Structure formats: structure tokens, C-alpha cells
Image (cartoon, rainbow, N blue to C red):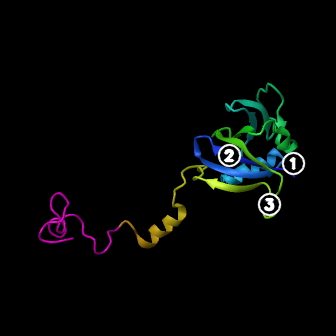
Amino acid sequence: MAVLKFRIYFEDDDSIYRDVAIRHTQTFFELHEAILKAYEFDNKHKATFFRSNDHWQRGREISLEVYEKEYKAQPLLMKDTTVGNEIKNPGQKFIYNYDFNKNWSFLLELINVSKEENGKLSYPATVRSEGIAPSQYGTKGLLGEKFADVEEKYDLTQGAEGFAEKDEEGEDAGLGEDGAATDEEEV
């Protein structure tokens, strides 16, 4: 059974991406769920894929459901459409839009086709992550909740013992006006 590997770029920054492996017989709905899981997004909003070309132009739509909007052609439905069925060339591209209010966009590019499955993986699977994923509902700090715990425990707002504030111990504690050590005291 063929395994397709897609590189899924966050549209605003191509240094942020996830590689997702999926069987060619699995559906776009499963790919949709795998992308959300890979980027740590919830599954509460509308979504759609577009088949694309090398210039990232939108083609045939593969939608989560039929939405109340004008369609040039009736969309395919994610649950009824297998991924392998929509691969038209070796570097096939898709555009994935999620949450039409926030308009999250991801660019998918087929980067590998393998005939052998990895027995250790449950498909679809995220096989590589690069960069810090954007936060779906706000800011996501590099240190996250762990830093807040450290800050509370050690009260990092107070000066630490043994470190003088400027002009607290003589003239900058043995430093001249330019910040270099004076002759009186070697640092």
C-alpha cells in the first residue's frame, strides 16, 4: 500500500512545517484531522482543501461539508474523497484553509511516495516537526506554563543576593565610567 508524505507549511512562515505520512487510501478528512493534531489546533471550525498547481493557485475544492456560498463546481467532500485519488502529479500541491474567520492557511506539498509502510506508525502520522507552531487563539510563549511556575516559585522580580545595583557599592563596584575595570581593582 502506498504511503504519501506531505510537507505542510504554515503559509505565513515556510520555516514552520510538519511532515505528515498518510496511506493513499485514507481520506482528506483523516488528513484534515492529522494537520490539526500536528499544529495543535482544535477541531471546531470549518475547513476546506483546494487542489493546487506549482503557483499555489486554487483548483478543485475538497470541503468538510457543503457551505452556504457560491461554488463554481460542487465541492468534493473530505469524508468521501481519498487522498490518492486526487494526486495528479509527483509534486502534487494542496492548499488547506481552516477556520474561515481567522483564515488559517497551510500549503501542502507531496514530497515522497513510499511503497512500504512503517509498522511502528499509526497512519496518518506526523513524522517531522520544524519550527514553533502558531497559537490558534493567541500568543504561545517559547517557555509556556513552565516559566510561570518558576517565576512564582523564585519571585524573579526581586534583585538576587550578591548583585549590586548601579552606584550601590561605590562607583559601579570598581568599574570606571566606560565600564572597564579600574587600576585599583582587577576584575
Secondary-structure class at tag 2: strand
Query: Please, is residue 107 above or below residue 163 in the view?
Result: above
> What amino acid does circle 2 point to?
Ile
Q: Quadrant of residue 105?
A: top right
Residue position marked by numbered label 3 in the rendering:
118
Residue position marked by numbered label 2 in the rendering:
8
Residue 56 colored magenta?
no
Q: Earlier in the sequence, mark 1 or mark 2?
A: 2
Q: Position of residue 112 (x, y in %)?
A: 75, 47
Secondary-structure class at tag 3: loop
Q: Which numbered dot is residue 106? A: none
Q: Earlier in the sequence, mark 1 or mark 3?
A: 1
Residue position marked by numbered label 1 in the rendering:
25
> What amino acid does circle 3 point to?
Asn
- Identify the residue at horizontal 52%, vertical 56% (top origin): 141
Secondary-structure class at tag 1: loop
3D distance between C-alphas at marks 3 and 2: 20 Å
Q: Position of residue 167 (x, y in %)?
A: 18, 65
Q: Nearer the viewer, residue 6 or 111?
A: 111
3D distance between C-alphas at marks 1 and 2: 19 Å
- Identify the residue at horizontal 71%, vertical 40% (top origin): 96
Q: Quadrant of residue 52?
A: top right
Query: Please, is residue 89 above or below residue 28 in the view?
Result: above
Q: Position of residue 71 (x, y in %)?
A: 79, 27
Q: Position of residue 187 (x, y in %)?
A: 21, 70
Mark 3 or 2, closer to the camera = 3
- Identify the residue at horizontal 56%, vertical 49% (top origin): 138
From the viewer's perspective, tell me whether residue 114 is left or right of residue 57. Answer: right
